Amino acid sequence: MTVKIEGRHAAEFLVSEANGTRSRGTLTLKAGQNLPAGAVLELDGTGDAIAFAGDSDSVAAGILWEATDASATGTNADTPVAAVIRDAEVNIDEISVENDDTAGTIKDAAVTSLALIGIIAR
């Protein structure tokens, strides 16, 4: 029997959000990024969304709504994406950061930064 493993579904990380669509917004995912649903995003110097790096300059801008491939194998261009950008609760186990270390310090930094924009990870 073939075993199939599903990736994260769109908005699977979301526990609750503000009324209507107030928690959501649109960001532009920078070309070259290939990220799963629930990826924490930050803005680069040009205002495009990229994977949260967790360095001293990183400030979370939101969480990617659904998996998006803006890399050379995908759209290969800056791509508008939906994201949770404010006032929401999310499942901490279902959000992700790129290149986290074994101690989880980058994810911890992302959770702290998300709280500053009203996104609480539980």
Image (cartoon, rainbow, N blue to C red):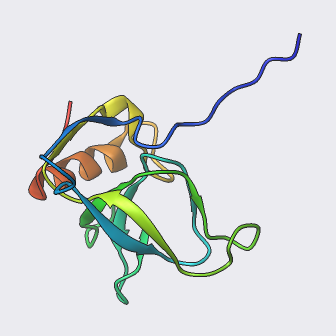
Q: Quadrant of the C terminus?
A: top left
Relative to 4, is 74 above or below? below
Residue 35, can we see it?
yes
From the top left corner, tell me how far across and down residue 3 is, in percent.
79, 17
99 horizontally vs 18: left or right: right
Compared to residue 23, the image places residue 33 above or below, namely: below
**Residue appearing at x 41%, y 35% in the figure:** 12
Residue 20 lies left or right of residue 6; in this view the side is left
Q: Quadrant of residue 5?
A: top right
Instruction: Point out the residue furthest to the right here.
Output: 1
- Picture layout, residue 120 above or below residue 66: above
Q: Residue at x 27, y 44 (%)?
A: 108
Is 35 in front, or is 19? 19
* Residue 85, image x, y percentages: 24, 60
Outermost residue to the bottom: 46
- Can residue 53 be seen by looking at this rendering? no
The residue furthest front is 20
Residue 43 rendering spot, x and y as whole percentages: 33, 75
* Residue placed furthest toward the top: 1
Compare residues 55 and 32 and report the one nearer the observer: 32
Name which quarter of the figure residue 15 lies in: top left
- Residue visible at 44% across and 66% down? 81
Residue at 57 percent of width and 68 percent of height = 33
Q: Is residue 9 above or below residue 116?
A: above
- Report the quarter where the N terminus lies: top right
Rendered location of residue 62, percent (x, y): 29, 59
Q: How many tags in the picture? A: 0
In the image, taking residue 24 as reference, residue 49 lies left or right, namely: right
